[in-house]
Amino acid sequence: MTKIEFHPEAQLELENARQWYRQRNLIAARAFVTEVLRAVKNIAASPKAWPRTRANERRFVLKRFPYSIIYRIRENKIFITAIAHQRQLPGYWRSRK
């Protein structure tokens, strides 16, 4: 399995989204985390399967939640740069290294 690494801000975005759902509905929060984990597993299994965006990034769009996982392929690892809400300013994560 390919190594997965999260940018600290992407990790914070994941936690903030989980907390947001948790405050509203515990079942939704669990479903959100489950979907993100499933997506990360799919990305690790086939990192080149999802479409490229600008700046050599790729985007995995979650099916049940309005979020995308933005990632880069770096040598032998996947670097997740953002857990981006689809209604936020597009590309806000591009400066993340």
Image (cartoon, grey):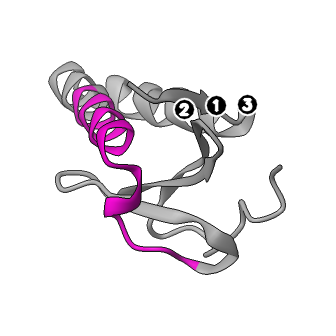
Q: Which mark is residue 8?
A: 3
Placement of 71 over or under 89, stated as above or below: above
Mark 3 and mark 2 residues within 8 Å of each other at the beta carbon: no
Q: Quadrant of residue 39?
A: top left
Query: What residue appears at the point 31 percent right and 48 percent down from the top-left corner?
Result: 46
Crowd class of label 3 (few under 14; some 14 to 19; many from 20; radius 10 Å):
few
Report how far apart the C-alphas of labels 2 and 1 lie in the structure. 6 Å
Q: Amino acid at mark 2?
A: Asn
- For the residue pair 4 and 9, the one nearer the viewer reads as 4
Query: What residue appears at the point 47 percent right and 70 percent down from the top-left corner?
Result: 87
Provide the major secondary structure of the magenta segment: helix
Q: Which mark is residue 96?
A: none
Q: Which residue in the rendered view is the most extreme toward the bottom? A: 54
Residue with the mark numbered 2: 16
Query: What residue appears at the point 65 percent right and 43 percent down from the top-left corner?
Result: 75
Mark 2 and mark 1 residues within 8 Å of each other at the beta carbon: yes
Q: Of helix, strand and loop, which one carries label 3?
A: helix
Q: Quadrant of residue 72?
A: bottom right
Q: Amino acid at mark 1?
A: Leu
Crowd class of label 1 (few under 14; some 14 to 19; many from 20; radius 10 Å):
some
Q: Is residue 61 left or right of residue 26?
A: right
Q: Position of residue 12 (x, y in %)?
A: 64, 31
Placement of 59 over or under 80, stated as above or below: below
Q: Is residue 37 left or right of residue 30?
A: right
The magenta segment is 34-53
Placement of 87 over or under 26, stated as above or below: below
Is 89 contained in the magenta span?
A: no
Residue with the mark numbered 1: 12
Q: Which badge, 3 or 2, comes first in the chain's sequence?
A: 3
Q: Nearer the viewer, mark 3 or mark 2?
A: 3
Mark 1 and mark 3 residues within 8 Å of each other at the beta carbon: yes
